[in-house]
Image: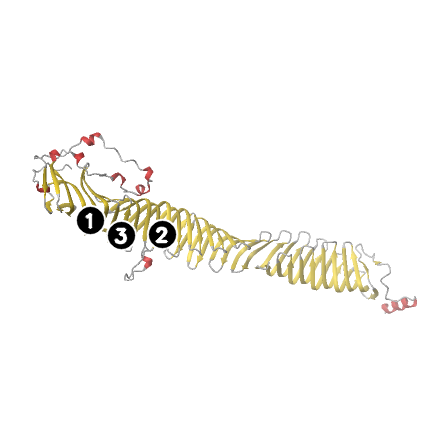
Amino acid sequence: MQICLLLLSLSLQGQNALMDSTSTAVQDTSADKTIEYQSDLLEQIIADDGELRKLIGDVQMWQDDVNMWCDSAYFDLEENNVKAYGNVIIEQGDSVHIEADYLQYYGNIREALLYNNVYLTDQKSEITSDTLYYLVGPQSATLYQNVSLNDNKVWVEADSMIYTVQDKQALFFEDCSLTDGEMILETDSMDYNVNTAIGNYRGGGALTSGESYMESQNATYLGQLNKVEFQDSVYFEDTRYNMWTDYLQYDLKEEIADFEGETVIDNEGDLIYCESGSYDRKIDRINFDRQAEIQSDGRVLKADGLDYSKEKGLGIATGNVIWEDTIRQLKITSDYAEYLEKEDQILATGNALLMNIIEGDTLWVSADTLETVKPIIPDSMDQAQDSLKTFLAYRHVKFMKSDMQGKCDSMSYSTLDSVFQMYYQPVVWMDDIQLTADSIIVETENNSPSEFQLRRKAFAISELDPGYYNQVKAKTIDGLFRDQELYKIEARSNVENIYFAQDDEGAYYGANRAECAAMDIHLQDREIQKIVFKNKPSAVFTPMAQVQRLSFFLKDFKWRSDERPKTLADLMIKEDEESEEPEEHEEEKEKEPTILSASGAGKSTKSGTESIQPAANQAGANQGKGKKRPD
């Protein structure tokens, strides 16, 4: 009734309820924050609950720094509220521009509610949603349903979001995802700052980048650095590795993962443990910085640092290196090592030490360089290749086991045939026997020597008492063992021999010096039983009373027992740390045995082809018994 009366009054005055928009804009002064407006047409509506203005056509409204545009609007003068429809735009200064299909604006509290096809931009990012609630004062927007943010770096989607225009800070909730076109990060809730391009999630999330997948409880996205930091219960997975760690930083462009804390990596069943490292996916290379350990089919490689390339199958270990084969009971320690995975081969340098337990005995080898390789196995041998190994040692080699010790410049040992091969000034000790030559081969059976072969400049020495030595020198010398005892020595070509004769009670009664083309020495219970000289032997026997000890050394004689490694400490002494060969003291030069009494001059005995002599009577000489050897 009131609306009808108002329209009748306007008609009587010759005015239409529709007013031209070219007239001066109407200003509502009924409130302190009155909304001002203008439009093509204006309709005044009087209702029971108050007076309305209906604005039609090119509607514009403003309040302080807020400007609004739409196709049509209803303005409640009493409440100072606006409902706007069609092509709605609201702007706040130069900082905020919002578009939607529908707007409710509350002038007294300066708040706006926008619906349908909502779009917000603040010159830094573009935000869309179904619904937006905007607070003019703090410039804060809360968005609901189908929310997205695009800042030309990333695209973020969620069910809802709170965005603060001033500091460009966004909080996303429910089904959140952040992508840069190459990767996608997913979580239930996260924050993101447009200015810094930094985003965080707390409470669990995951990232997928190409073939890489990462998840953690907490994470930080660093857009300007193109990196993501993952913390707490981190899991990484790609086509090659599965990794669990405390902290991981992933470079999205370079595809490099840096990790810290207790880390476990599964490499197709091989396990890697470490405390710090880096993984480069592009070149498939992992570097471990602290306390790295690789476990693979009974093999373990430990080091302070480890660089591993899956593509090359190469691992480089540095600092306190330990390589262990638990199946073969083999261990190598060093300062540096290279491991070839496919060949199952390791090369170790710097204080390199090998330990191999063989049938209850332990073989120790030290060298400047140690290497293990797979031997070539004949087809006829029915043995698993994985159970066989050849050890190579280079420069300043020393080795030690219960029944044999030695040193040389290079050595090999094969588990295929249980053979030691030593080259370049090798020396081997077995019990009280010292062996030297240009090269030495020792064959073993059941972990005990079965044969030794000395080639070129062969020299065998046995110490009887300090200063008294049985000696054999030849081009080649072979030794044969039976029941773990040396029972025969065969010397061939240019044979020279010095032998101190003893009676049944062990007393010395003479020394025999012989030369021949070949010689066999027969032993029993480590005692010489018989010596056979072959092919025109020549021998001289000298009674002990006439023996001048210093003249009973073959050329190139050198007793090197002080070089014999007996402990692990001896194995690790460097060559330049070892003492020089001690000079013989004057009292040793003048020392003569106090155990002898004999008579008779030296005799020379020659035979056409062969001379066989018992150990107690060399070259046909039969001398009186001497005094018993002192204890």
Q: Position of residue 406 (x, y in %)?
A: 27, 44
Q: Give the residue at mark 2.
A: 324
Query: Residues at badges 3 and 1 in contact (C-beta under 8 Å)?
Result: no
Q: Which mark is residue 525?
A: none
Left or right, 315 with respect to 457, comes to right
**Earlier residue among tags 3 and 2:** 2
Q: Secondary structure at mark 1?
A: strand
- Of circles 3 and 2, the one toward us is 3
Towards the viewer: 175 or 123: 123
**Earlier residue among tags 1 and 2:** 2
Report crowding for label 2: few under 14, some 14 to 19, many 20 or more residues within 10 A (C-alpha). many
Q: Which image quarter is the N terminus in?
A: bottom right
Q: Which image quarter is the C terminus in?
A: top left
Amino acid under label 2?
Glu
Left or right, 68 with respect to 496, comes to right
**Earlier residue among tags 3 and 1:** 3
Q: Secondary structure at mark 3?
A: strand
Q: Position of residue 2 (x, y in %)?
A: 86, 68
Q: What is the count of numbered marks?
A: 3
Amino acid under label 1?
Gly
Report crowding for label 3: few under 14, some 14 to 19, many 20 or more residues within 10 A (C-alpha). many
The CA distance from mark 3 to mark 2 is 22 Å
Amino acid under label 3?
Val
Towards the viewer: 509 or 499: 499
Q: Position of residue 386 (x, y in %)?
A: 33, 58
Q: Check the image and tell me how it is coloured.
A: secondary structure
Left or right, 85 with respect to 475, comes to right
Q: Give the residue at mark 3.
A: 419
Q: Give the residue at mark 1.
A: 479
The CA distance from mark 3 to mark 1 is 14 Å
* Residue 11 appearing in the image: yes
The CA distance from mark 1 to mark 2 is 34 Å
